[in-house]
Amino acid sequence: MIVAPCSMRTLAAIATGLSDNLITRTADVHLKERRRLLLLARETPLHLGHLRNMVAVTEMGAIVMPPVPAFYQRPQCLADVIDHLAARAIDMLGLPGAGTAVEWDGKA
């Protein structure tokens, strides 16, 4: 499951087990069944409460992946940035046939 974008409110709800809507309930089920849960946390700057919630969900088994552009790919337009972020997120799920994100080759 990918939560994109994941607001700090949604992140906090998942971190505390508050399952008051479909997204947080589904995330809760993914965590309890040890399924992959990817949270694209969108807000900055972060304060200590945000960071603690990120630690809490990580300790529960989620993956926090802020949607940070990969400029080493030298994107030509915004669509390139979005496509790369989406491909990386899908690759993180480990689905068969994934692996579409271009990896950094160390030459930039």
Image (cartoon, rainbow, N blue to C red):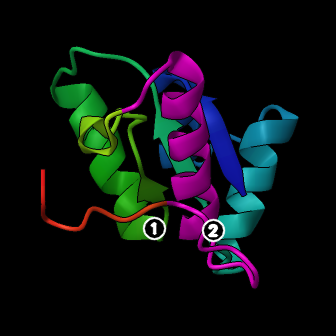
Q: Is residue 10 left or right of residue 22?
A: left
Q: Nearer the viewer, residue 45 or 74?
A: 74
As helix, strand or loop, the secondary structure at mark 1 comes to helix
Alpha carbon distance from label 1 to label 2: 7 Å
Q: Which residue is mark 1?
A: 60
Label 1 vs 2, first from the N-terminus: 2
Q: Are marks 1 and 2 in contact (CB under 8 Å)?
A: yes
Q: Nearer the viewer, residue 79 or 34?
A: 79
Q: Quadrant of residue 66?
A: top left
Q: Residue at x 69, y 57 (%)?
A: 28
Q: What kind of residue is marked 2?
A: Leu
Label 2, residues with CA under 10 Å away: few <14, some 14-19, many ≥20:
some
Q: Which residue is mark 2?
A: 31
Q: How many marks?
A: 2
Specify start and end residues of the magenta stretch as a single range.
75-101
Q: Residue 44: x, y in percent?
A: 28, 16
Q: What kind of residue is marked 1?
A: Met
Q: Indicate whether 74 appears above or below 44.
A: below
Q: Residue 49: x, y in percent?
A: 25, 28
Q: Residue at x 78, y 33 (%)?
A: 20
Q: Is residue 107 left or right of residue 53?
A: left
On whether residue 57 falls in the magenta region, the answer is no
Residue lying farthest to the bottom in this orientation: 96
